[in-house]
Amino acid sequence: MPIETETPLLLLDRDQLDRNIQRMRETLAPFNVTFRPHVKTHKCLEVTERLFVGGKGPITVSTLREADFFFAAGFTDILYGVGIAPNKFAHAARLLEQGAELKLVLDNLESARLLADFAARSDQAFGVLLEVDCDGHRSGIPPNAPLLVEIAQLLQRSGVKVSGVMTHAGNSYDSRSIEEIEAFARRERDAIVQAAQLLRNAGFEVPMVSVGSTPTALFTHDLTGVTEVRAGVFAFFDLVMAGLGVCQVQDIAVSVLTTVIGHQPDKGWVIVDAGWMALSRDRGTAKQPVDQGYGVVCDLSGQPVGDLIVTAANQEHGIISSRSGNPEVALALPVGAQLRILPNHACATSAQHAGYHVSTEGRRLGYWPRIAGWGISL
């Protein structure tokens, strides 16, 4: 049945969300590790509360705005998982003064010296995780680099606590098979354990040994030496995860509801009111074996409609056409018909919206707001 609310809007299937969360719980249960979910995908209190059973556990955030929001909601054990910038030291210090158990991340001597100087001036006790590069994806220090010890010693001398090490196997998102994901999971685990041992050999306790990405968390076979796992997009999944084989298309919990507003019959196009402002510009499936354009087109029940995808997107217009070039299915969709678009990247698509229109078994449950932004308002 068509939804009367104006489109485009972001839909969230609560039951599928819960199934995805349960899958991650069951996968990690045999390993006796702490789960520190990343809240950057959903940025929503109602979703975050569903990640835990009987309490408010540790979380990972990607902005200090998230840290403020979730701390105010009672989440106290927070890892800010992005390398700390000097212009955020004071913000982090305020969170610590308010009682947050906030841990910061850094991977270079310059940041360490600046934080040490700020800590001395402010008399603030910071806790830091050193970021380790396990796969050349982004940031971090090689797991066998003496620089790890050098930074840890500098921080320790300045009264900054070295709480542990963390890494992220971001290159697992480029895998072409489950076997490759499993190999990245081994590399992730081996690298972080090596880095932790290097620091322990230098006299550091290293209580936190943290790894995490959704693919490696779901397909790891050995977490010996790891104390905690982080992951975020698992709660929603998306077409990138489906393209990796991490989930099925039917497991994707979020979609964008859109309405047909016109046709270009000579081109085989259907025009809808969801452009890149609703879907995002993310084309994460373009480098996968199956390019899903700007998203897979589904009916209101969530079933894909033929081989239709969003092939182009302007600011407020989406163009739907057949992957195979057959216009018949697309042009059969009348003006006013409503469709659901599955996202390439759940984080990016969700970020285009102020909140989720939540449903269960086809019934609308309500609206769950998201937060946005990075820091404090000026």
Image (tube, rainbow, N blue to C red):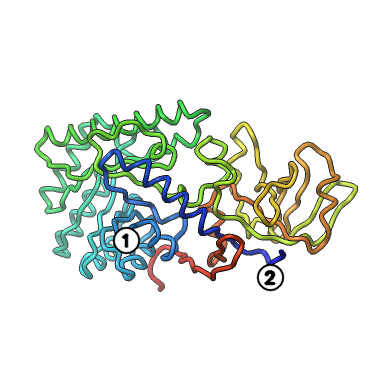
Depth order, front residue of 29/187: 29
Q: CA distance from mark 1 to mark 2?
A: 39 Å
Question: Which residue is painted at 54% across and 67% down in the image?
Answer: 354
In which quarter of the view is residue 150 placed? top left
Quick check: 314 left or right of 86? Answer: right
Q: Nearer the viewer, residue 370 or 162?
A: 370
Residue 89: give x, y in percent of width and height. Answer: 27, 61
Residue 362 screen position, x and y as percent: 61, 62
Q: Mark 1 belongs to which amino acid?
A: Lys
Is 43 placed left or right of 267 in the picture? left
Camera-nearest residue between 303 and 161:
303
Q: Secondary structure at mark 1?
A: helix
Residue type at mark 2 is: Glu
* Residue annotated with mark 1: 88
Residue where numbered disc 2 is placed: 6
Mark 2, residues whose alpha carbon is within 10 Å: few (<14), some, or many (≥20)? few
Percent from the top left, x then y, of residue 225?
22, 35
